[in-house]
Image (spheres, helix red, strand yellow):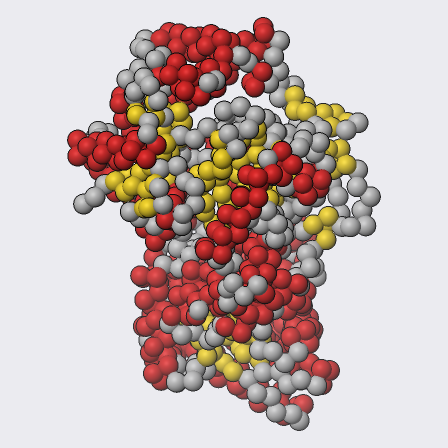
Amino acid sequence: TKWVYRFGDGQAEGGARDHEMLGGKGANLAEMCALGLPVPPGLTIVSDACDTYYKNGGHIDDRLKAEVRAGIAAIEAITGRHFGSTSQPLLLSVRSGARVSMPGMMDTVLNLGLNDETVQALGHDAGDARFAWDSYRRFIQMYADVVMGLGNDAFEEILEDEKAKLGHELDTELSATEWQHIVSLYKRLIEEELGKEFPQNPEVQLWGAVGAVFSSWMSARAVTYRQLHNIPEGWGTAVNIQAMVFGNLGNASATGVAFTRNPSTGEKALYGEFLVNAQGEDVVAGIRTPHSITEEGRLSSGSDKPSMEKLMPEAFRELCRICTELEIHYRDMQDIEFTIERGKLWMLQTRSGKRSTRAAMKIAVDMVDEKVITEEEAVLRIEPSSLDQLLHPTIDPRVNRQVIGTGLPASPGAATGAIVFTAEEAVEADAEGRKVILLRVETSPEDIHGMHAAEGILTTRGGMTSHAAVVARGMGIPCVVGAGTMRIDQRNERLLGIGVTLKKGDIITIDGSAGQVLKGEVPMIQPELSGDFGRIMGWADRARRMTVRTNADTPADARAARSFGAEGIGLCRTEHMFFEGERIHVMREMILAEDEKGRRLALDKLLPMQRSDFTGLFTVMHGLPVTIRLLDPPLHEFLPKTDDEVAEVAFAMGMEPLALRQRVDALHEFNPMLGHRGCRLAISYPEIVEMQARAIFEAAVAAAQETGAAVVPEIMVPLVGLRSELDYVKACIDAIAGNVMAEAGMKIDYLVGTMIELPRAALRAHVIAEAAEFFSFGTNDLTQTTFGISRDDASAFIPTYQRKGIIEHDPFISLDFDGVGELISIAAERGRRTRNDMKLGICGEHGGDPASIRFCETIGLDYVSCSPFRVPIARLAAAQAVI
Ligand code: PEP
Ligand code: MG
C-alpha cells in the first residue's frame, strides 16, 4: 500500500472522494489543487499510518520515512527551495486532518525546518530579518508545546515581559533583534526545563512533528471530543505536510478564515475575518481581534479596523471568485482558510462549514431556490436532533433590554443563568441542577466539559471563528464572544460590565442571536416555527411514509404537540392524570379501600374527572387517532412513603396512621417493575378497567357531539405477556362499550390493542394478534426486560459500560437494534402474519431518537410516537429514513 499522496502545481494523487483515507483536510487540499486553485504543494500521509504508528509503539517506520522524503523532494522541485538548506530553505507546515473535523482538538506545527542557520538564510531571501526571527520564535514555541510537551504559558510570559520592558503593545512592533533576543530566551527556557536543546536538525524536527500529530489523536481532549461526537477511535488521523506560505511577511501579507455564507444566519454573503502580518493560528487563537473581510461585515460589526476589501482589493476579488467556485463545486457552504503572502492569495483549507441550525435551514432552502440542490437533498442537510436549537426560547421583543455588554452573536438562542468563571464550576452546577452561564476570556479545548454543562457561554475575546464560537454552535448552546466592552477579573471572580460589576452567582441573560449580555432574568418567548423551517418540514412531510404521533397526557401537551405537527396521540399515560390536585386523594381512597365495594365508591368519584380529561384530549385532537393506555404503574406509587407523609395522608383521610402504614407495607414489592402492574392490575381489579373504559367511551360521545368529528379511541392494554390476559381485559372493555353505546344510542368505533413490552409478547405476537387490533412497542420496558436491566437503576453502571467500551450507547436512549430490535421485527412480522393490516407503532423514548426512527422505517412500522418537543425531530428523521 501507498502511504503518501502528493499534490501540487495543479495535480493531485487524491481528491475529495478519498476523505476517509486522506482525512478531510488532505482530501480537499488535493481536490482544490486539481481544480487549479492556488494551493501550496504538499503531501498527505494516509490515516491508516496512524494505526501503524500506534502498533509500532510510537515509531515511524522506515518505509513511511522514505515515502515522505520522496514527497518532500517533489515539493522542492516545485518550489525551488530545499528542506534544511542554508540557501533558499524550504519550510513546512505539519497538520493533522481526521476524516471529520475536530476543531481545535488536534495539533499543528508551522515554520518547521528553521534553525540557527536557516533562519539567517530565510531572512536574507525575504529581505526581511524581522520576519525570519518572528517565524523562528513561533516555530520554537509551537514545537516546544506540541512536540516537547512544554505548554505555552512560560513562553507567553517571556514575551509579555519583554514587550513590557521594551514598551511595545503589539507583537508586530518588535524588531528583528528584539525577536532574536526572545528566541535565545526561548531556547534557554527549553534547556532549563527539559535538560536538552531545541533540535536543530530539520529531519529530527520533521519526525518529531509527525509523531506528535499521530499522538494527538489519543490526547485526552481528542478522546473526550470523540466520545461527545461518537467518532470511532479506529479512524486515526492523516498528516498533511505542506510548503509554508507566509502571512507574516509584512503588511502586504495576511491570514484569515472565511465562510462562503454567514454561519449564524445563513445569509448569502462572504463572511470572515483576517489579520494583517500574522500567521494562521493567530486568528483562531483570538490573540488579536481580527478585522472583517468585507466592508459590509465591518459596518455591521461597528468595527473601525479596515476590511480586507479595502486594504487588499485584488486579493479580495480573487478570494470572492474562489469562494463562489468552491461553493458551486461542493454544492454546499464552505469554511475556508487562506493566507496572503506579499499580495498573492493561497488556499490552505476548505470544508463544509459548520453552521447554526437556523443557518442550515436558510442555506438549504436558498440552495433549493438557487437550483443547486433538490428538496430531498435539502431535507437530508438538516441534522434532526439539531432542531432542538430552533425550539430554544428567545428574548421577548417587548422587553426593555438592560444591556451590560455587547459582543458577537456566535450561536443563536437566549439563555439565563448564574455566572461561573471555570469549566469545573459549570460541571458542578449542572450536576446539582443549577443553570449557569460560563464566562471565559477565551475558551480552549480543556473547557469542553464545562461548555457542555452550561446554558450559555460568554467570552470577552476572540471572533466568530474562535474556539468558543465554533464549539457552541456545534453544541447548539447560545453563545456571545468577544464582548470587549466587558472585562473579566478572574482573580476576584468579578465581571465588569457597562455600569455594573457582577460577582460569581449573579444572574445574567445572554442573547446569542444579537450578541448582547443582559442583567438578570429576562422574559422569553417560544420560537416561531414558520419560514424556512416550515418549508423544510413541508418537504420532509411529503417524503416520509411513517406517521408521527405524540406522547401526551394532557390537553395542553396535545395542543403543543399539534403545533409541532403531531398527527395523533400514540400514548396517553392515564396514571399521570391521577397525580393532579384533588385526584390523588380519591385515587388513594380507591387503593386503600377494604373491598370491591369501597373501591367502586372511589372509582365513581374518579369517573367524571377521567371523562373530562379524555373529552379535552379528543377535542384538541379533533378526529385524529388517540391511543389511551389503561392504568400501568404499581399502586403503591400513589401512596405516601415516609412516616411524615403517612401521618399527613392518614390525617387527611381520617385514618389511623398505623393502619395506613400497614396497608402501604402490604403493597410493598421487591421488584415493582416486574410486579403487580400493567394488565395484572386490570385482572385483579376489573372495576378499574370498567371505570376507565366508561370514561373513554362517554368522552368519545361527548367529543363527537361537540366537535362533529368522529372519534375512534384506541384503548391500549399495558404489559401483556399472555393472550389470555388480553382476552380477559378486552372482554371487560367490550362489555362497557356495549353499555355506553346503548345508553347514548350511538355507535362508537374503537380499537383494542396492546403494548408489546415483554419478550414473551414479542415471541407470541401471532397469537396475541388474534385478540389485539394494534401493537405499540413500549421499548422502555422492552429494553428493560430484554436486557434484564432496571430502567431506573441503569445510570449507575451504563456510563461505566460506555467508558469501558462494553456497549457503544445507552440502549434506553437509542434502540439496541441487535437484541431489542430483533424482538421488534419478530413481533411485527408475526403480528402481521395473523392480521395483515394491523397498525404498528412505537411509543417508548426511542420514538424520538433519529437512529431508532430509521430502524422503525426499515421494519415498516406505521408510526412513531414521541414527546411534543421531539415531534419535529421525528418528522425530519422519518423523512431522512426513506430518502
Ligand atoms: C414503554 O415501556 O416503552 C412505555 C412507553 O411505557 P412506560 O414508559 O410508561 O412504561
Ligand atoms: Mg411500559
Closer to the camera in the image, 233 or 136: 136
Work out which quarter of the rendered image holds the C terminus and state it. bottom left
**Seen in the image, is 412 located left or right of residue 27?**
right
Q: Position of residue 742 (x, y in %)?
A: 63, 92
Give the answer, above or below, for where 676 lies relative to 300.
below
**Seen in the image, is 10 located left or right of residue 706?**
left
Give the answer, above or below, for where 566 lies relative to 642.
below
Residue drawn at the location 56% of the way across and 19% of the way down: 172
**Seen in the image, is 524 located left or right of residue 364?**
right
Q: Position of residue 95 (x, y in %)?
A: 37, 34
Q: Position of residue 464 (x, y in %)?
A: 59, 39
Q: Quadrant of residue 315?
A: top right
Residue 330 visible? The answer is yes
Closer to the camera in the image, 295 or 535: 295
Residue 638 visible? The answer is no
Residue drawn at the location 69% of the way across and 81% of the way down: 703
Residue drawn at the location 67% of the way across and 51% of the way down: 393
Q: Position of residue 712 (x, y in %)?
A: 58, 83
